[in-house]
Image: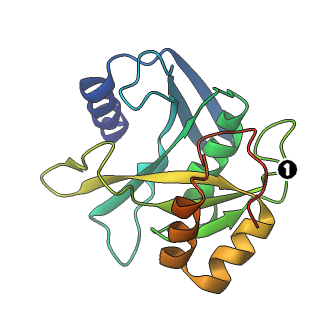
Amino acid sequence: MVLATQVQEHYVSAFGRPDREAAFTAGELSIAVLKWSAETHPEGVAFYATLGASAFTPADAPEHRTEFFAGLLPENDGIAASLADLGSYPLREGRAIREGDTLSVGEPLWPGTEMTCYWVTRTASPVLAPLALPDLHVEFLQAIPLYESERRHLRSIGADEFLSAWEARTVPFWDPNRPATS
């Protein structure tokens, strides 16, 4: 619980108090998703961030913890449940989610979309600096919503080539209403 408080304080020191908070539980697992509106967040998107994913202690790197975030414009609060699911995955499955992983949840990430996957990545410049504590650090990784076809394409050509293609086509990955790109 102490770590969750420190992570929340880190979010607040960077972005101010969240506009909304939603709590999700599954058995003993508890993940919150905090939201900052596009008007209040420095990135200019509705910013959704997990709180509680960092409770998972990876066996191979116990000092390394992770939280996840996604930015959408226009906002779509329906993303909160699937983002909480992503955050609880390591706790449920006993396996860390690392940068570069893609995860299919097998159902729409929010009502009305056909996107069913997340691509977990680092941003080119950190949206939020890691939280450094005496015995561990918490990294904040971006969860980009993907269509299954995009996930397959990403896995077949690799992250660098996939990202270059998106940049060349100026794909608005933050747009929850964007069409599939592959």
Q: In this view of the protein, which residue sits in the foreground, 71 or 134? A: 71
Mark 1 element type: loop
Left or right, residue 17 beside residue 157 = left
Q: In this view of the protein, which residue sits in the foreground, 112 or 27? A: 112
For residue 63, which quarter of the picture? bottom left
Can you say which quadrant of the picture contains the C terminus?
Answer: bottom right
The residue pinned by badge 1 equals 114
For residue 149, which quarter of the picture? bottom right
State the residue at coordinates (62%, 68%). 102
Across and down, in percent, residue 12 comes to 31, 24
State the residue at coordinates (40%, 24%). 41
Can you say which quadrant of the picture contains the N terminus?
Answer: top left
Amino acid of disc 1? Glu
Kindly tell me whether residue 27 is visible in this rendering: no
Q: In the current view of this chain or complex, which residue is farthest to the bottom? A: 156
Against 164, residue 176 (above or below) is above
Left or right, residue 46 beside residue 107 = left
Across and down, in percent, residue 132 comes to 18, 50
Left or right, residue 11 beside residue 85 = left
Against 143, residue 21 (above or below) is above
Q: Residues within 10 Å of mark 1 (few under 14, many from 20)?
A: some
State the residue at coordinates (61%, 84%). 157
Q: In the current view of this chain or complex, which residue is farthest to the front? A: 168
Q: In this view of the protein, which residue sits in the foreground, 160 or 61? A: 160
Across and down, in percent, residue 116 comes to 78, 55
Against 78, residue 133 (above or below) is below
Q: Tell how many labels.
A: 1
Against 96, residue 129 (above or below) is above
Across and down, in percent, residue 40 comes to 41, 16
